[in-house]
Amino acid sequence: MGLLTSLLGHLGISRGAPVDWEELEAILYQTDLGGGTIASLMTLLEEKKNSLDAKTILEAARSEIKNFLPPLPETLLPRSDGPTVIFLVGVNGTGKTTSAAKLAYYLKNQGYSSLLAAADTFRAAAIEQLSSWGERLDIEVVKSTYRADAAALCHDALSKAQRLKADFLICDTAGRLHTKSNLMEELAKIKRTVAKLDPSAPHHLLLVVDTTTGTNALEQAKEFHRAIGLTGLIVTKMDGAGRGGVLVAIAREIGVTPLFIGTGEEATDFQPFDVDSFLRRLL
Ligand SMILES: Nc1nc2c(ncn2[C@@H]2O[C@H](COP(=O)(O)OP(=O)(O)O)[C@@H](O)[C@H]2O)c(=O)[nH]1
Ligand SMILES: [Mg+2]
């Protein structure tokens, strides 16, 4: 049962009790949907106050959310004129390195070749972590040394991907706090550097969002979007307690939607985002 369904049950709305609007609003907040969505949802529900039951609330919430999330994920397709370059960005620990490996593996299973770039040079362990994924999944990892210049590494990796005619280049970048402008500037630099080899690159800038961080992810999304312009999200740890309601807030505020979700620690725990299964879980 979805969170909202069970909470509405507690509220007694399903049994035809009078609606306690404040309590209803508090319940909606527990889904991490965000103030904007909740406010328009409340307006919508108040219009229907004479026939309000749990089913009406759920349906209104679903259609409201669907207005902001596309019914089908935008798929990642290879281009005919060179590797498709994907950057994975985000704060520490959200699942960037794991998702880079999972994404390469997903694309491999679709019949596409990828190179992985270990561009998190801030942590020696991150280079090791991606290399070991690469070995396990039989996907080549382009790496440099600890503290090497990440922009130069991505440039070399793209040059190699072009030479090998790889379909995709996936760059795992260092975790950075969205509030640190020098680190955000480094990302912009990596972006400019790969554009020297291919002016259309990077083609996808995906923010890796950990659903267990709740609504803070909205602030992260705004700052990363401002700094480098995001094109999509990868939402991780959907196997955990986080509901992912913040995705709706992100879609509403900056127009960026999820492409994939992570549902565990294995390479196969990764699927294209599906709005209907997301809604079933959320609500
Ligand atoms: N349960 C679960 N754990 C995940 C998922 N994605 C990543 N992790 C774990 O989260 C931790 C941090 O992941 P990592 O890729 O190193 O994060 P990074 O710092 O952003 O590169 C690791 O222990 C991963 O195994 C997921 O979808 N579900
Ligand atoms: Mg990492």
Image (cartoon, grey):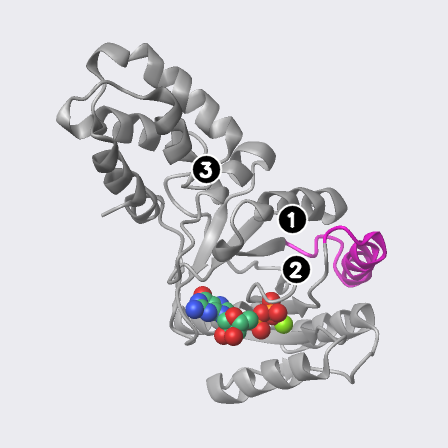
Which quarter of the figure is the C terminus placed in?
A: top left
Residue where numbered disc 3 is placed: 33
- Residue at the far left: name it: 15
Labels 1 and 2 touching (C-beta < 8 A): yes
N-term-proximal mark, 3 vs 2: 3
Q: In the image, is 195 to the left or to the right of 230? A: right
Q: Amino acid at mark 2?
A: Val
Residue 189 shows in this picture? yes
Tell me how far mark 3 sits from mark 2, CA to CA.
Answer: 21 Å
In this rendering, the answer to whether 247 lies above or below 46 is: below
Q: Amino acid at mark 3?
A: Leu
Position of residue 31 measured from the top left corner of the image (x, y, whole percent): 41, 41
Position of residue 227 measured from the top left corner of the image (x, y, whole percent): 76, 47
Q: Nearer the viewer, residue 120 or 83?
A: 120
Q: Amino acid at mark 1?
A: Gln
Residue where numbered disc 2 is placed: 91
On whether residue 131 falls in the magenta region, the answer is no
Label 2 CB sits under 8 Å from any ligand 1 atom: yes
Helix, strand or loop: magenta stretch: helix
Labels 3 and 2 touching (C-beta < 8 A): no
Residue plotted at (22% across, 29% down): 54
Tell me how far mark 1 sits from mark 2, CA to CA.
Answer: 8 Å
On whether residue 187 falls in the magenta region, the answer is yes
In this rendering, the answer to whether 57 lies above or below 139 is: above
Tell me how far mark 3 sits from mark 1, CA to CA.
Answer: 16 Å
Q: Secondary structure at mark 1?
A: helix
Residue 101 shows in this picture? no
